[in-house]
Structures are given as structure tokens and as C-alpha cells.
Image: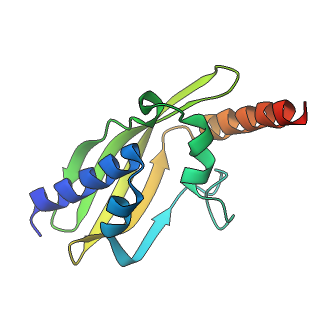
Amino acid sequence: MTVEENEKLVLKVFDAIERRDDKLFRDALHAEFEIVWPASLPYGGDKGVTWSETWELFQPTAAERKLDPRVVAANENTVVVLWRQRGLAPSGDRFDGEVLGLYQIRDGKLSRAQMFYFDSAAVANFLAKARKRIGRESAR
């Protein structure tokens, strides 16, 4: 694939995530797709919890799901994208942080994605506080 085709593929994946289009997302993935999140996050490492399971509650509208992806570098098998992670907690607290994603393309499909959060501690704190609030509300 060309550099431009690789960029379009990765941006198509972002569009699928924003619109919660699971079929479009799955269709863009290589059979051996791997995703790597920082281990410090609830969905990082091998914790059995996914990014979408974690963020679904905290992205109730299109505004929170908007990722604003911007390709910052690309070549014949790698695309680097700067994007935004947003969330809204039940308390009204908001999160808006930058993430750098490193995406590898193989056989015309997305084969690997690795995320580098600019402030993973802030993400973890937002999620912990938001989950705590949900726990208190469900106990009532």
C-alpha cells in the first residue's frame, strides 16, 4: 500500500471508533492484530478489560467520542497519529488529553497499534474517580 492508503486506512479506523461501528473496525484489522496500551491504565497489560468497555460509560455523546486524529508521520508500513482521549464523568468532571498512536500496517490491514499517553497518570486518576462515583451511585 502507498503512504496515502495507509493514512486513509488508519483514519478510517478512527472514524469507526468514533461512530462505534464495530464491523468497519473489525474489517480493517489484520488477523494477527495486536493493541498495546500503557500497563498503568485499567485496560493496559493483560487485565481482561478493554478500552471500549472502560470508556463507553464516560463517552455518552459524540463530543466525548470525538478523537480529532491528525497524522503526524507515515511511511510504507507505519502511521503515527496524534489524537485526543475525552471523557465525561457522572460528577461532571471532564477529561481531555493527548495520545500518540503508532500504527503498523501489514497486508493492507492494521496489524498493530501502540498508544503513548502524554499523561497516563491523569487518565488513570480520571477513571478511578469516575468509577468511584459510579460505585457510590449504584449503591444508593
Q: Note whether 86 is above or below 102 in the view shown.
A: above
Q: Give percent across and percent down for residue 73.
A: 21, 50
Identified at 42% across, 49% down, the residue is 20
Q: Give percent across and percent down for residue 113.
A: 40, 62
Observer-nearest of 122 and 30: 30
Observer-nearest of 74 and 7: 7
Q: Residue furthest top?
A: 92
Q: Give percent across and percent down for residue 112.
A: 38, 68
Q: Note whether 90 is above or below 41 in the view shown.
A: above
Position of 76 with respect to 47 (left or right) is left
Position of 42 with respect to 77 (left or right) is right
Q: Note whether 10 is above or below 126 in the view shown.
A: below
Identified at 18% across, 61% down, the residue is 6
Identified at 62% across, 48% down, the residue is 54
Quadrant of the rendered image containing residue 95? top right
Position of 132 with respect to 34 (left or right) is right
Quadrant of the rendered image containing residue 57? top right
Q: Which corner quadrant holds the N terminus? A: bottom left
Q: Give percent across and percent down for residue 103.
A: 33, 60
Quadrant of the rendered image containing residue 137? top right
Observer-nearest of 53 and 114: 53
Identified at 30% across, 41% down, the residue is 69
